[in-house]
Amino acid sequence: MTTPEHEPPAPQPSASEFHDRVHRSSAGIAGGVLLLAIILWLGIDALVTGQGRTPWLALAGMILAVPLVVAFTVRPAVYANSDRLRVRNPFRVIVLPWGQVSGLRSGYSNEVFDKAGTKYQLWALPVSLRARKRAARRQARATVATARATGGTSAGGAGDTAADRDPIRTDTDQFMNDLREVHEAREHAQSAQGEVTVRWAYEIVGPALAGVVVLAILIAVG
């Protein structure tokens, strides 16, 4: 009597494949929180101590300013997983399956292009030319130091130093490079296909428009 053979369980995909990698601008968030604190402090002070139309103007100004500050500083984020790239910009949320991405470009701003040629700017990945220059200087120093230590040669070949194989980048440039690698690896995956979707952020647009309307009425009434 033979013992029945049990088939090994099918390998399960690692959980990390399904977790979004998130990038947000820490400097933008810090600046946004500071601006919000100033707006609320001045606005609440005007509401409490202001006279005549001042409290109403302060209220309308806060209704307008707070959503805009949140939209441009706190809100922007880029989410990436094995199937899609989700871009949360000030007024829109764009979801691009990797199969619909034609490329990512880094210049004076970081951008992603879909197969139709539409360009979407990545607000959460601001470009800092000063940071790039600092990274370039560190790269040059690392290359010279490694070349001196190895006599200008390494396992990679003559003149191919470790610093050349692993270049120093800014945080945003490194994240863009990671996105390109994911795109190259997952572009043709079955689960990474689909349609590009764009949704307007009505939770931001609505309050901002309400603030504009109230402010315009108060100014018109005089």
Image: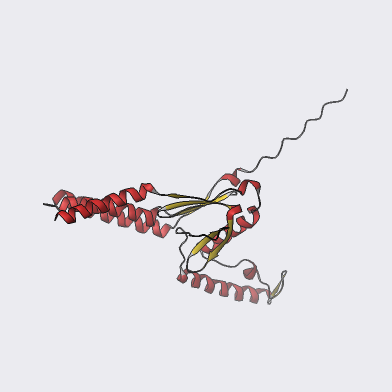
Where is residue 140, by image quadrant? Answer: bottom right
Structure colour scheme: secondary structure
**Which image quarter holds the C terminus?**
bottom left
Q: Say if 220 sits above or below 15 in the image.
A: below
Which residue is painted at 61% across and 55% down in the image?
182
How many numbered discs? Answer: 0
Looking at the image, which is closer to me, 22 or 94? 94
In the displayed structure image, the side of residue 128 where residue 71 appears, left or right: left
Q: Which residue is drawn at 65% across and 49% down?
A: 189
**Observer-nearest of 156 and 73:** 73
Residue 220 visible in image: yes
Horizontal side of 156 relative to 168 (left or right) equals right
x and y percent of residue 214 in the render?
A: 23, 51
Q: Quarter holding the N terminus?
A: top right
Which is more toward the observer, 57 or 221? 221
Residue lying at the far top of the rendered structure = 1
How far across and how far down the image is residue 18, in percent? 58, 45
Q: In this view, does 11 lie to the left or right of 181?
A: right
Residue at 68 percent across and 72 percent down: it is 160
Residue 108 in the image: above or below residue 15: below
Which residue is painted at 78% across and 30% down in the image? 6
The one of 14 and 100 positioned closer to us in this rendering: 100
Where residue 49 sits: x, y (%)? 14, 51
Quarter location, residue 2: top right
Residue 175 visible at all = no
Residue sitting at the far right: 1
**In this picture, residue 139 sits left or right of residue 109:** right
